[in-house]
Each structure stands twice: as structure tokens, then as C-alpha cells.
């Protein structure tokens, strides 16, 4: 990792940022200045002020997204603040432009409460056609997204939650085919009950209500007998998303399970744990940069399909597989609310791009040019 870290530091210092603003129509004729700016622009301002529903036709709202973070949960680095978040928001903006042609603006906020973040985003929202929330810690992220979806007439998408969930579901649909299982019979263990873990469990349960899911946090299985649960975990139990009938640690949870999905910490899963799982188990070890278990170890212990969050192993579960297409569809089709139905359709569309799933090929590459148009087509 030291080599890639050195390259990243050198390249970022060389470029001094990864993105820039370009003109759609460069001009050399001074007369055009009167069209693009004063006095001509006054006519455009007057028109959209009187016809706000036409703003998308006269400004960049039809093709732009704000990528917003408060820096409270950046990658695996944790709460490192807005300056630490900025390189990641720039990177996200780069991916929006490269894969979907969407103009994305990185914005980092030096406020951290739910009310402050919601107020800040609402204040700048008229400048954007959509909002991509990123690297905001749980449980605040759930309430922030909820309030913004209620207050704003544009698509709001917390990618750490829903982008991850969509790609996990897409990969799992194909992993089930590879292992000749029935989705509704799956016994699933999810390690990590933060933003990604919660969204994954909810979407899996929405896709198939019969799947059995156990959640594990840093204190063990999330069960009805525990008295230290926050409101989010209590709701997962009360609404039936997870099975809270048993107690114990991670090793207890995975024994006999078909699927392990990790969005937690590297090195948590041992070969012995994988050996205790059902035959031909499915392992999605997505902690970055170190997975919960390395792929070779998981396979040696009997796993039939292994996915990680890394690009140097097969089956990379990466949000970039879906979020450019999701926003491309939302912007192009005037979608104001990205619903569970949209997420399910996106996951199925991604899964269907792999015509013949194999143990080392259950998810399309981020570089697959079919992804954006295919996903965009189902976000309507």
C-alpha cells in the first residue's frame, strides 16, 4: 500500500486538485460576452425568475450534482473533518464526470449536527439538480437524508447507504446463481450496522422478505436481549429486518450461515469461521483497505464466491458501479425521489449485465460502458 499511497500523494500535489470547470462554448468574440453575461443574461434571469420550472432548460441544473460531506466518516479513516473529506469528494466528482458526463461539485461542510447540515444543504440546493451525500456518520446520516428528501424537490442519495446496498444486492443475485441456491432460503450475516450495513439489510429484505438476516456490531449479535442498542438497531429488530432471537459473537453468528457480508473492520473473520459456514459459502468482505478476510484465505476455507471492496481482486463491490447511472437516470428523467423500487431495478439491471456468472465474475467492472445507460434506463 505504501507504493500506491506515495503515487497518490505525488499525483495530487502535481495536479493540485482532480477537477476543474470548463466552458461549454468558449468565446473569442467580445459580442458574445453580451449574450453570456450582461446585458443579455438579465433577460434569462428575468425569465427563469418568473418561470422557475424552466430553470433546468436555461441553466446547468439539468446536469449537475452536489457531492456533500461533513467529513465525519471518511473511508476507513473515520471523523477526520471537512478538509480530510475534500479529496474524496473531488474523487467522487471525477467519477460522475468520467462515467456519466455529470458536472459534480465537491462541497464540504464545517458543521456536524443534523439541523446544521440540513439547513446548509437546503440553503445551497437551488444551485443543484441533485444531492449526493457522502461520508456522513451514522446514525445522523439517516435523519439527514430523511429530512432532505422531505424538504427538497430534487433527488437525494446517500451513496454510502444506497449505492453500497444496490451493488451488494446485484452481486448476491449472481452469487446465488453460481452456488445454485434459492435467494429466499438464504441465511445471511451482516457485520457492521452503520449506514452501509443498515441499507444493505433493508434492501435485501425488500428484495426478498423470506431471507434470514443476523446483524453483528462491535458488541456481538444485535439481539432482543441487549440493552445497549440505539434507535436504529431497535427498529431493525422491531420491523423484522433482522433476526434478534439469538445472542453471541461473530463466530456464533456465522456458524451454518450461507452468506457473510462485511462492512466493518479488516481481519475480523478467520478461516475457522468460514469453515463453520454452510457448504459453498458466499463471502462479501468489503472493509477497506483490508477486508474482513483475504480472498485466498476465504477460498481455502471453503468459500465458493468471494467479493471485496478492492480493485485488485475479482468481484469488486464498489459504489461507482451504480451511482453515476442512478443520477444520470434521475436527471434525464426528472426523477425527484429515488425509491426502493428504483434501487431494486438498478440492482437487477446490474446483475443482468453478467450473462454467465462465475465465481470470479458476479459483478460488472466499474469500467463497463454499458453500466450507466443500463441503470439510467430504469431510473424513471
Image (tube, rainbow, N blue to C red):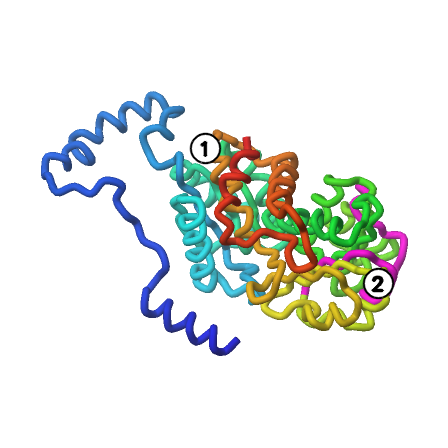
In-image side of 343 versus 276 (left or right): left
Q: Count of labels shown?
A: 2
- The secondary element bearing badge 1 is classed as helix
Question: Viewer-proximal residue, 360 or 78?
Answer: 360
In-image side of 207 versus 289 (left or right): right
Question: Viewer-proximal residue, 254 or 370?
Answer: 370
Q: Position of residue 160 (x, y in %)?
A: 58, 52
Whether label 1 touches label 2, CB < 8 Å: no
Q: Using the rendered image of the protein, determine whether residue 100 is visible from the camera's viewpoint.
A: yes
| 277 over 47 or under it: above or below | below
Q: Which secondary structure is most common in the magenta stretch? A: loop
Q: Which residue reaches farthest left?
A: 30
Question: Viewer-proximal residue, 233 or 287?
Answer: 287
Is 272 in the magenta? no
Could you say which quadrant of the image residue 6 lies in? bottom left
Q: Which residue is mark 2?
A: 277
Q: Residue at x 69, y 68 (%)?
A: 292
The magenta region covers 239-264
Q: Position of residue 51 (x, y in %)?
A: 35, 21
Q: Which mark is residue 168?
A: none
- The secondary element bearing badge 2 is classed as loop
Amino acid at each position: 500500500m505504501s507504493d500506491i499511497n506515495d503515487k497518490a500523494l505525488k499525483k495530487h500535489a502535481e495536479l493540485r486538485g482532480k477537477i476543474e470547470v470548463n466552458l461549454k462554448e468558449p468565446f473569442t468574440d467580445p459580442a458574445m460576452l453580451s449574450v453570456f453575461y450582461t446585458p443579455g443574461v438579465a433577460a434569462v434571469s428575468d425569465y427563469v425568475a418568473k418561470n422557475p420550472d424552466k430553470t433546468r432548460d436555461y441553466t446547468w441544473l439539468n446536469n449537475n450534482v452536489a457531492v456533500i460531506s461533513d467529513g465525519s466518516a471518511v473511508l476507513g479513516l473515520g471523523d477526520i473533518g471537512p478538509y480530510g473529506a475534500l479529496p474524496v469528494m473531488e474523487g467522487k466528482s471525477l467519477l460522475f464526470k468520467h462515467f456519466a458526463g455529470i458536472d459534480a461539485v465537491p462541497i464540504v461542510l464545517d458543521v456536524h449536527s443534523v439541523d446544521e447540515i440540513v439547513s446548509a444543504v437546503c440553503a445551497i440546493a437551488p444551485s443543484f439538480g441533485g444531492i449526493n451525500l457522502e461520508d456522513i456518520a451514522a446514525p445522523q446520516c439517516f435523519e439527514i437524508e430523511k429530512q432532505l428528501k422531505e424538504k427538497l424537490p430534487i433527488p437525494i442519495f446517500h451513496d454510502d447507504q444506497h449505492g453500497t446496498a444496490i451493488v451488494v444486492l446485484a452481486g448476491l443475485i449472481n452469487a446465488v446463481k453460481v452456488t445454485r441456491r434459492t435467494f429466499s432460503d438464504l441465511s445471511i450475516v451482516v457485520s457492521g450496522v452503520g449506514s452501509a450495513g443498515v441499507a444493505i439489510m433493508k434492501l435485501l429484505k425488500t428484495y426478498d422478505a423470506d431471507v434470514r438476516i443476523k446483524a453483528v456490531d462491535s458488541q456481538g449479535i444485535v439481539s432482543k436481549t441487549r440493552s445497549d442498542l440505539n434507535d436504529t438497531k431497535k427498529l431493525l429488530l422491531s420491523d423484522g429486518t433482522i433476526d434478534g432471537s439469538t445472542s453471541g459473537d461473530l463466530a456464533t453468528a456465522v456458524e451454518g450461515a450461507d452468506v457473510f457480508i462485511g462492512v466493518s473492520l479488516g481481519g475480523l473473520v478467520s478461516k475457522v469461521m468460514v469453515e463453520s459456514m454452510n457448504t459453498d459459502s458466499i463471502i462479501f468482505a468489503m472493509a477497506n483497505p483490508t477486508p474482513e478476510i483475504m480472498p485466498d484465505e476465504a477460498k481455502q476455507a471453503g468459500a465458493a464466491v468471494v467479493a471485496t471492496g478492492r480493485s485488485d481482486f475479482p468481484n469488486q463491490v464498489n459504489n461507482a458501479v451504480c451511482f453515476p447511472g442512478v443520477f444520470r437516470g434521475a436527471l434525464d428523467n426528472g426523477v425527484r425521489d429515488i425509491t426502493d423500487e428504483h434501487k431494486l431495478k438498478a440492482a437487477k439491471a446490474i446483475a443482468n449485465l453478467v450473462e454467465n456468472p462465475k465465481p470470479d465474475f458476479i459483478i460488472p467492472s466499474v469500467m463497463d460502458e454499458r453500466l450507466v445507460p443500463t441503470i439510467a434506463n430504469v431510473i424513471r
